[in-house]
Amino acid sequence: MATSNPAFSQSPAFQNRSTAAATLSAENLQEMYNSPSAGAVETDRMTVEDTIVKTAVSFGVLLLGAVIGWVVPVLWIPAMIVGLVLAFVNIFKNRKKPSPALTLAYAGAQGIFIGGISLFYETEWSGVVLQAVIGTIVVVGVTLVLFASGKIRASAKATKVFLIAMIGYVVFSFINVILMLTGVNKDPWGVLGTQIFGIPLGIVIGVLVVIMCAYSLVLDFDAIQQGVKNRAPRVFGWAGAFGIMVTVIWLYLELLRIFALSRN
């Protein structure tokens, strides 16, 4: 059985070893303290910073597609169809495992569509595209600031109202298109062109839709925040990027129509 030896513990050799061990331990601790914290790549977990990067990449592809659509506007109709199909594919795919390739493909297709239809609006109503871009940036920026400061948050009641309003808007839009295609309403805007006290109905509805878009952004930000909080896999950052992209595109198109209607 081993016994302690006071003479040995007080020997120079023992004290030197203890000092070296303490120094080594302190150096290791300092090195660990100075080293950068593990990021999304090391942990394979979703982070706000990584989601921002994915969102920026997605919008980069969207803008590139918009340039193509602006130069070759004839592509906007097939791009719209492809983008719509990819939107549904991504929605179902994101529930299990988001796909970066499908998200970027959606961004490219929608970019071409946005570029083509923006050229049409700009040709008919000069300056309307710049107005819509500025309006989109303002709405997104204000919503982000209010969300980050805690001024607005998603709630079960507000989300229920949002979903009901969304369904109503989709049904109304579908009926409006049918009336236009069948010739029942010959106004270029359909029912949206109807004047109420001198103001086109489309502007009134458009303002309400912009508010819906702002709340949709709140839901997107909240989903990202919850994903980070629940330590979701890193790949779900693409789902966050997709959600923001869908909402921003919707917002931009609605603002395009509002500004165009205001010119009449």
Image (cartoon, rainbow, N blue to C red):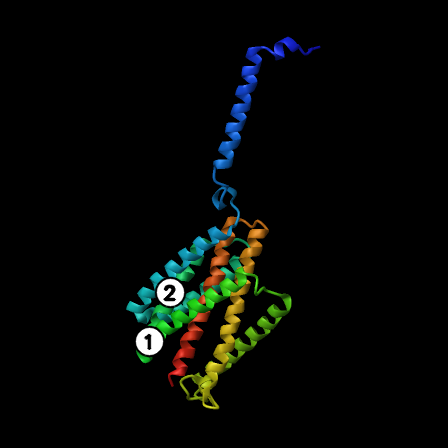
Residue 191 in percent (x, y) is at 47, 86
Q: Dividing the image into 4 quarters, which one contains the C terminus?
A: bottom left
Would residue 110 be visible to someone looking at this image?
Answer: yes
Q: Secondary structure at mark 1?
A: loop
Q: Residue placed at 48% from the left, 78% from the top?
A: 206
Which residue is more in the foreground, 53 or 171? Answer: 53
Other residues around mark 2 within 10 Å, as few (<14) / some (14–19) / many (≥20): many
Q: Read off the residue under disc 2.
A: 111
Q: Position of residue 182 (x, y in %)?
A: 44, 86
Q: Which residue is drawn at the image coordinates 40% and 65% (left, top)?
A: 110
Q: Which mark is residue 116?
A: none
Does the rendering let one see residue 178? no
Please state if 130 lies on the left or on the right of 234 as rendered. Answer: left
Quadrant in the picture for residue 123: bottom left
**Mark 1 vs mark 2, CA separation in Å:** 19 Å
Looking at the image, which residue is at 53% across and 72% down? 212
Q: Which residue is mark 1?
A: 127
Q: Position of residue 245 (x, y in %)?
A: 45, 63
Q: Nearer the viewer, residue 74 or 15?
A: 15
Eyeballing the image, is 203 above or below 155?
Answer: below
Question: Horizontal placement of 198 versus 116: left or right?
Answer: right
Question: Please, which residue is most extreme toward the bottom here?
Answer: 197
79 relative to 234, above or below:
below
Q: Are marks 1 and 2 in contact (CB under 8 Å)?
A: no
- For image coordinates 46% across by 82% down, the residue present is 202
- Please name the amino acid that badge 2 sits on: Gly
The residue lying furthest to the right in this view is 1
Q: Earlier in the sequence, mark 1 or mark 2?
A: 2
